């Protein structure tokens, strides 16, 4: 009886953010938005490998996305603090779908060239630089500080379950119908997400409109630079995006070059990663207003580094699927704790700009993809994974004492 009561309480905590009607609309909209992003990532990687048979090009296109995202990221944060967030994210979804439609038509009429994909990658990077801080800021506006960890974890549940479904769909569609129809999935999911955002109620007008654009930009950078806790978190985020989340971009290379899988096999490998991510975020969401977010962040990041290092020593398909599952799980528990800590350390007036800088660190994921793709081309994919793992382990070991001794992280939690 006590066990049933405990499980009931955990379930109540797990779905607490979803009790909010506006958050439910947001969750469903981001479910389709995330599926679009996941399908695009797999489709682009596989298509580039088919066109060039060189991992360097997979990394290069990812790098273009990263450079665009980093270059525009600070402006994206200012936009979040000045424009209506719901309108902004709806427009972003429309243009993401439009890019998918254009690529579909170019493939159908056999007109697609690498420079088209490079241009699409650049525009997607710009859109992402605004979408990420906009989405995170909307979540905080809906649920507030007490439910932010649960809400972000619930959002990641949607993201990863949709990525799992999208991975299986993309792999099957590419194998059976052709890569052009996979880009059609990108378009459909983006536009479905855009429509659902319109049903979300609430007030999402910005707080700071009076200051000039450039003054707002300078304030956001100055605030983050002077706040050593935020600066430390942004530095850690850059590291994990560069060497941890770039694993997503490496998946097509791992599937084809190391494991010898076809497009459908890539879909299964990516789905295993997404399954681990989904189960992990369910567990994190069930923690509720968990006090020890810094411990969760450090432990998760360290486990990602160890798992990537172990990946170097195997070419067994089953073990690779298990490691992909584990890496996905710990990346998402890290992500939920990092996003929560950053939002809790910010004031309402500055939050969008800090999240814009946080979004810039996301640009290091595709930039890391370029770096690891180059290493894969020059040496081997295994060496690229090994460098990633060792870099994460070394850095997290070095900074963990600073995190643990910083009482502000625990006071804000």
Image (cartoon, rainbow, N blue to C red):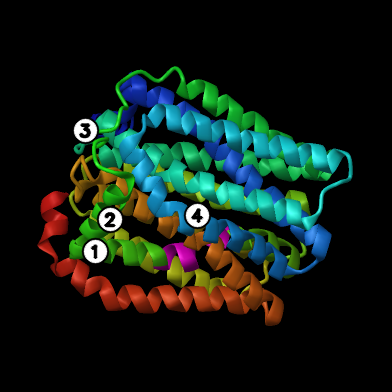
Q: Quadrant of the N terminus?
A: top left
Reply above or below: 151 against 215.
Answer: above
- Contact between labelled residues 1 and 2, with CB atoms less than 8 Å apart: no
Give the crowd class for mark 2: few <14, some 14-19, many >=20 residues within 10 Å: few
Q: Is residue 173 left or right of residue 313?
A: right
C-alpha gap between disc 4 and disc 2: 18 Å
Real-space CA distance between mark 2 and mark 1, rounded to the nearest whole angstrom: 11 Å
In percent of the image, x 53 and y 56: which residue is there? 68
Residue 82: image quadrant is top left
Q: Which residue is mark 2?
A: 218
Horizontal side of 154 relative to 53 (left or right) equals left
Q: Which mark is residue 69?
A: 4
Name the mark on residue 376.
none
- Pointer 3 or 4: first along the chain: 3
**Measured from the top left, where is residue 6 in percent x and y?**
24, 34
Circle 1 is placed at which residue position?
225
**Does the image show residue 236?**
yes
| Sequence-first tag of 2 and 1 | 2
Identify the secondary structure beneath mark 2: helix
- Between discs 4 and 2, the one toward the N terminus: 4
Label 3 environment density (alpha carbons within 10 Å; few <14, some 14–19, many ≥20)? few
- CB contact under 8 Å: marks 2 and 3: no
Which one is in front, 134 or 196? 134
- Cα distance in 3D space between marks 2 and 3: 54 Å
Q: Residues within 10 Å of mark 4 (few under 14, many from 20)?
A: many
- Name which quarter of the figure residue 190 lies in: top right
Mark in front: 2 vs 3: 2
In the rendered image, the vertical position of residue 191 relative to residue 231, given as above or below: above
| Marker disc for residue 2 | 3
Is tag 2's residue or tag 3's residue first in the polypeptide sequence? 3
Highlighted magenta segment, given as a residue range: 239-248
């Amino acid at each position: 009886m006590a066990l049933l009561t405990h499980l009931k309480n955990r379930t109540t905590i797990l779905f607490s953010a979803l009790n909010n009607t506006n958050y439910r609309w947001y969750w469903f909209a981001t479910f389709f938005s995330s599926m679009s992003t996941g399908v695009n990532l797999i489709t682009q990687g596989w298509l580039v490998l088919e066109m060039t048979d060189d991992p360097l090009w997979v990394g290069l296109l990812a790098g273009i996305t990263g450079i665009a995202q980093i270059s525009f990221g600070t402006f994206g944060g200012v936009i979040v603090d000045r424009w209506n967030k719901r309108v902004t994210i709806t427009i972003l979804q429309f243009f993401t779908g439009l890019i998918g439609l254009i690529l579909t038509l170019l493939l159908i009429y056999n007109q697609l060239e690498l420079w088209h994909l490079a241009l699409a990658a650049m525009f997607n990077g710009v859109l992402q630089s605004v979408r990420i801080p906009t989405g995170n800021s909307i979540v905080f506006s809906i649920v507030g500080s007490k439910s932010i960890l649960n809400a972000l974890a619930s959002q990641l549940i949607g993201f990863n379950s949709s990525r799992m479904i999208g991975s299986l769909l993309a792999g099957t569609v590419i194998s059976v119908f052709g890569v052009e129809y996979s880009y059609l999935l990108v378009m459909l999911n983006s536009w479905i997400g855009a429509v659902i955002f319109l049903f979300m109620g609430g007030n999402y007008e910005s707080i700071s409109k009076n200051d000039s654009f450039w003054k707002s930009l300078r304030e956001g950078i100055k605030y983050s630079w002077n706040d050593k806790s935020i600066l430390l978190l942004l530095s850690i985020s850059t590291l994990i995006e560069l060497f941890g989340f770039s694993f997503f971009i490496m998946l097509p290379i791992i599937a084809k070059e190391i494991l010898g899988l076809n497009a459908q096999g890539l879909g299964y490998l990516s789905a295993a990663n997404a399954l681990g991510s989904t189960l992990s975020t369910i567990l994190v969401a069930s923690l509720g207003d968990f006090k020890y977010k810094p411990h969760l962040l450090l432990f998760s990041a360290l486990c990602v580094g160890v798992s990537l290092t172990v990946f170097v020593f195997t070419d067994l398909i089953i073990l690779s699927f298990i490691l992909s599952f584990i890496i996905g799980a710990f990346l998402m528990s890290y992500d939920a704790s990092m996003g929560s800590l950053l939002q809790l350390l910010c004031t309402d007036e500055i939050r969008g700009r800090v999240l814009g800088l946080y979004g810039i660190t996301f640009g290091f994921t595709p930039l890391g993809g370029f770096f690891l793709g180059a290493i894969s081309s020059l040496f081997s994919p295994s060496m690229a994974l090994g460098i990633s793992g060792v870099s994460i382990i070394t850095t997290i070991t070095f900074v963990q004492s600073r995190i643990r001794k910083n009482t502000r992280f625990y006071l804000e939690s």
